[in-house]
Amino acid sequence: MKVGVLGAGQLGRMLALAGYPLGMRFRFLDPASEAPASHLAEQVVGEYEDEAALDRFVEGLDVVTYEFENVPVETVRRLGSRGCSVYPPPEALEVAQDRLVEKRFLRELGIATPEFASISTYDELKAAVSRIGLPAVLKTGRMGYDGKGQRVLREPGDVTEAWESLGGRALILESFVSFERELSVLAVRGRGGESVCYPLVQNEHRTGILRRSVCPAPMVTPELQSEAEDLARRVLDRLGYVGVLAIELFEVEGKLLANEMAPRVHNSGHWTLEGAETSQFENHLRSVVGLPLGSTAPRGYSVMLNLIGKVPDSASVLAVPGAHLHLYGKAERPGRKLGHITLSADDPQMLPSRVALVEELL
Ligand SMILES: Nc1ncnc2c1ncn2[C@@H]1O[C@H](COP(=O)(O)OP(=O)(O)OP(=O)(O)O)[C@@H](O)[C@H]1O
Ligand SMILES: [Mg+2]
């Protein structure tokens, strides 16, 4: 089986690492040379719209997937029209690339989201602020990641300033949710329509970037888990989805609001490499090539810590019991995800002291 992956970042790299034991081979397409996945597999360096690069990329592939949700939908459709199977379906990309389309889609499926309004002019912004109220979050409709392209509006004076920094493109205003916590659900749907879900994960963000995930999330009632699985399955089934899908959630008074979805493997699923029977990466590959899906049962308890901007000394990290280090081969740069550490233990009581040891190194 030769799998093509659009995007050659760390997610692609971890997909390849998970596919090799199953005898798979990989080729990546990414405009950035020396991308993290290129250290392990063939990489075609080229733009996603470049026909000649796409020709070199698809030659001899059995199936194509992507690790980056901003690959042009047109590229995925073009590959499909050449007879290449591409999963997840392009409709999933279309929905996930535009926050407004995404929120409308979720609402249509009966899934609760924060209040929102489409904004294209300053007057629309003022009207939306008076309808939704403050605090609120103004976001670019497209291309946001790691909290980029967002402004929190706390007082009326923030409105003009936020418009000056983000105005001029399609925006969305959302009510600011005072959530109790952030959770995410990762679900996998196979080619035959069967699906499995991982246990809910609890996520902590700082300056818009995921810092830490606790897996499984503590104090999740069976009702909350099934609410999350039910909403994820509605999305999967509506899209005829194949692969791993992540949905980021806010928990408010025991209920879930959907924030956004990612049609790919997700940072909040990295713990599954050591912490679940089958990792998200392996399950994504199993589904896109048509193999049976693997168990999503957790193995013990895990905490995943992202390495942002700087990489700690490997020896010090690995001296911590239960620590697993993953480095993506990227150069240090402020705000950049360079790797992650998963701490695992059979007894959840063991984790806080191990987390404290690692946090001293970060
Ligand atoms: N409406 C909201 N109310 C409260 N907090 C919010 C809201 N929207 C976003 N946030 C906070 O900002 C974080 C990043 O927002 P969001 O997920 O929309 O952006 P992103 O840039 O696509 O992030 P990423 O790519 O890292 O998932 C959220 O995880 C949450 O902590
Ligand atoms: Mg997000």
Image: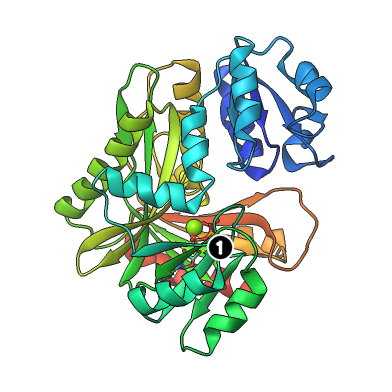
State the residue at coordinates (38%, 33%): 188
Q: Is residue 230 left or right of residue 196?
A: left
State the residue at coordinates (37%, 25%): 240
Quadrant in which residue 312 is drawn: bottom right
Q: Amino acid at mark 1?
A: Val
Quadrant in which residue 151 is drawn: bottom right
Res. 24 in view:
no
Q: Quadrant of the C terminus?
A: bottom right
In the picture shown, does residue 86 fall above or below 256? above
Residue 337 on image: x %, y %: 66, 58
Res. 94 in view:
yes
Q: Quadrant of the N terminus?
A: top right
State the residue at coordinates (72%, 29%): 28
Residue 326 on image: x %, y %: 63, 49
Q: Nearer the viewer, residue 307 or 85?
A: 85
Residue 282 on image: x %, y %: 49, 30
Residue 253 on image: x %, y %: 20, 70
Q: Nearer the viewer, residue 145 or 67?
A: 145
Callout 1 secondary element? loop
Q: Is residue 119 left or right of residue 300?
A: right
In the picture shown, does residue 223 fall above or below 136? above
Q: Nearer the viewer, residue 78 or 123?
A: 123
Q: Is residue 36 left or right of residue 120?
A: right
Q: Residue furthest left?
A: 223
Residue at image mark 1: 320
State the residue at coordinates (21%, 61%): 255
